[in-house]
Image (tube, rainbow, N blue to C red):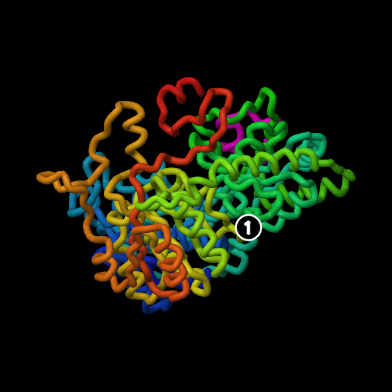
């Protein structure tokens, strides 16, 4: 046994697990942890300017790797830890594993109402805040068991459906020396095996897909976390079944592949949505059915004319929205491996040429329908033209560029018009949509994949939320290109409010006395951050600016004027409820119910 503090024991464990870096914000309560990580375990810490920056950086680091070790953050008591809440919620519902070490006040003062203690309904009940938004949350109150608490949390984070875990460690627990027997960790997590599918269920699913006339595969985040891209491609090519995704699975099959349907959601590809809604058998691999992915739950008729095969590592997701003809609790890679094996063993074949020809015709029709917006010469720029041009430039320079997209109006265009040719390198915050998710991605993606550029899409107001996270990029010499979509408004909210009420409130920013639309100067903010700034006012300026920025491999900001008059793109397709509903169209939601 060795004598060390609990913080030192945790630091040595994380070093043995292969932790290469952690993201921190310094405060008095986490000095013990920071000292142990930095000087005892010699794990480099990445200083951040706000706690939520640390969470987003760690989250995006994982999304660019999707394999051990899990990312680690370290924050401090009170509002410092509170600042992580929206980032941890996003990571939880987007299935990102993460170890969030949070420091607290000393245990000897619990219940006395000391500074920053959450005490009025019990002795430091801080963790109650995290119970619904983290996979696991625990407070360690003994220095001799703190390491076991961290180890259990670490394993929980990566087992089954991944998610963030919170370990709340009071400062006296961190700093108390105790005799600790450091456990062997060989195979501690690597020996774990994710669940595999029921064999009979897999064979039934394979037969159903083989008999289908219009089958579609639909892939989500489960494909990425299982790193099942090769298996997805193999099964698609073996069976001849086209592949659609939600944004979480975007590029799971390269989107220039003949069998790719692209993203299927309210703002997806026209031919993809048409194929998905007319499919007779639908294989869902680790994708949620939320309101955006289903246009207010109006796309599908599962249990009626459509049959659903639903595969998910989380049994709670199967049947949450739609009844499944076959439900399989399984890791996506194992399910696909089982389908590949069953397809061969059962001698299954299908002729899907007619189905693919129909889809090809729909694709040609859709490309004609959207040609005007992807080639639009309006200034300020049209979002569709901007995204299509960026896709062309990135794929010409480096198709393996990391792409991180913020929430907002841009997500009405990126799913359909950005062609992702390699798996897993594009992500956005899918569930909670916290504004400002993407700028910290310059650091998270840039540190994880330094050989490839990083491209960040962010609206002007989201940039104002977290743009100062780029200070960390400058400190650590991390390059990346941030496209700031500048039109002095929260554009994602304008159209919906006007549709519902004929007017809107608080979504344009202006000088109150004069009515002049106004933003802080994005370019000057960029210069203060030591970024190279490119001002783009017309479509012909965008491609040259983006090419120069990507090739520089430096921190760059493209301050792009975009039109506030552009209508959100939605699939130009008439469905059973009429035209495609706006996501928050109250009347359409009632019809969908």
Q: Position of residue 373 (x, y in %)?
A: 48, 46
Locate residue 280 relative to residue 383 in the image: left or right: right
Q: Is residue 136 visible?
A: no
Q: Nearer the viewer, residue 165 or 322?
A: 322
Q: Is residue 193 left or right of residue 371?
A: right
Q: Quadrant of residue 308?
A: top right
Q: On the image, numbered disc 1 is attached to which residue?
A: 227
Along the line of sight, the residue nearer the viewer: 158 or 208: 208
Residue 129 location (% of width, % of height): 34, 44
**Above-or-below relation of 149 to 577:** below
**As drawn, which residue projects farthest toward the right?**
347
Q: Position of residue 458 (x, y in %)?
A: 38, 55
In the rendered structure, the answer to whether residue 79 lies left or right of residue 383 reads left
Residue in the picture at 60% in, 49% down:
222
Q: Is residue 322 magenta?
A: yes
Residue 395, percent across and down?
A: 56, 64
Q: Is residue 164 above or below residue 588?
A: below
Does the magenta segment cover residue 443?
no
Stretch in magenta: 314-329
Callout 1 secondary element: loop
């Amino acid at each position: 046994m060795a004598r060390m503090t609990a913080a030192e024991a945790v630091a040595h464990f994380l070093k043995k697990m292969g932790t290469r870096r952690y993201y921190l914000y310094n405060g008095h309560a986490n000095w013990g942890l920071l000292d142990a990580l930095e000087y005892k375990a010699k794990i480099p810490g990445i200083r951040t300017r706000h706690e939520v920056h640390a969470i987003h950086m760690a989250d995006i680091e994982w999304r660019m790797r999707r394999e051990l070790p899990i990312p680690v953050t370290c924050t401090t008591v009170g509002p410092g830890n509170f600042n992580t809440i929206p980032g941890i919620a996003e990571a939880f519902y987007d299935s990102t594993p993460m170890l969030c070490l949070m420091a607290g006040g000393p245990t000897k003062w619990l219940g006395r109402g000391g500074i920053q203690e959450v005490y009025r309904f019990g002795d430091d009940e801080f963790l109650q805040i995290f119970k619904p938004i983290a996979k696991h949350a625990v407070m360690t109150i003994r220095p001799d068991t703190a390491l076991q608490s961290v180890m259990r949390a670490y394993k929980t984070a990566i087992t089954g459906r991944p998610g963030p875990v919170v370990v709340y460690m009071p400062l006296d627990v961190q700093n108390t020396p105790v005799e600790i027997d450091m456990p062997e960790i060989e195979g501690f997590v690597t020996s774990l095996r994710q669940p595999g599918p029921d064999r009979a269920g897999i064979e039934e699913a394979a037969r159903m897909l083989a008999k289908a006339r219009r089958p579609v595969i639909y892939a989500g985040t489960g494909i990425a976390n299982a790193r099942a891209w090769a298996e997805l491609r193999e099964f698609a090519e073996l069976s001849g079944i086209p592949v659609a995704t939600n944004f979480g699975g975007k590029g799971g099959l390269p989107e220039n592949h003949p069998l790719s349907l692209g993203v299927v959601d309210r703002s997806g590809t026209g031919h993809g949505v048409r194929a998905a809604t007319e499919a007779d058998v639908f294989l869902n691999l680790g994708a949620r059915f939320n309101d955006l992915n289903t246009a207010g739950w109006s796309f599908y008729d599962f249990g009626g004319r459509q049959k659903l095969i639903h595969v998910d590592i989380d049994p709670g997701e199967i049947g949450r929205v739609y009844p499944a003809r076959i439900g399989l609790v399984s890791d996506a890679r194992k399910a696909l491996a089982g389908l590949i094996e069953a397809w061969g063993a059962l001698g299954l074949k299908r002729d899907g040429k007619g189905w693919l020809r129909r889809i090809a015709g729909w694709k040609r029709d859709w490309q004609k329908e959207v040609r005007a917006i992807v080639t639009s010469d309006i200034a300020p720029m049209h979002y569709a033209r901007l995204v299509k041009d960026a896709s062309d430039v990135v794929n010409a320079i480096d198709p393996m560029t990391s792409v991180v997209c913020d929430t907002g109006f841009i997500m009405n265009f990126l799913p359909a018009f950005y062609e992702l040719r390699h798996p897993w390198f594009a992500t956005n915050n899918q569930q909670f949509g916290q504004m400002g998710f993407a700028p910290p991605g310059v650091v998270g993606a840039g540190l994880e994949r330094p050989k490839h550029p990083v491209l960040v899409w962010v609206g002007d107001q989201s940039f104002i939320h977290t743009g100062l996270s780029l200070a960390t990029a400058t400190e650590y010499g991390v390059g990346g290109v941030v496209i700031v979509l500048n039109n002095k408004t929260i554009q994602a909210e304008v159209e919906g409010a006007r549709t519902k009420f004929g007017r809107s409130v608080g979504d344009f920013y202006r000088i109150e006395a004069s009515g002049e639309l106004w933003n802080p100067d994005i370019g000057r903010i960029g210069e203060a951050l030591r970024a190279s700034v490119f001002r783009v006012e017309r479509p012909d300026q965008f491609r040259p600016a983006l090419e120069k920025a990507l090739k520089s491999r430096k921190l760059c900001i493209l301050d792009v004027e975009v039109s506030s008059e552009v209508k959100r793109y939605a699939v130009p397709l008439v469905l059973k409820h009429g035209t495609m509903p706006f996501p928050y169209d109250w009347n359409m939601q009632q019809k969908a119910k």
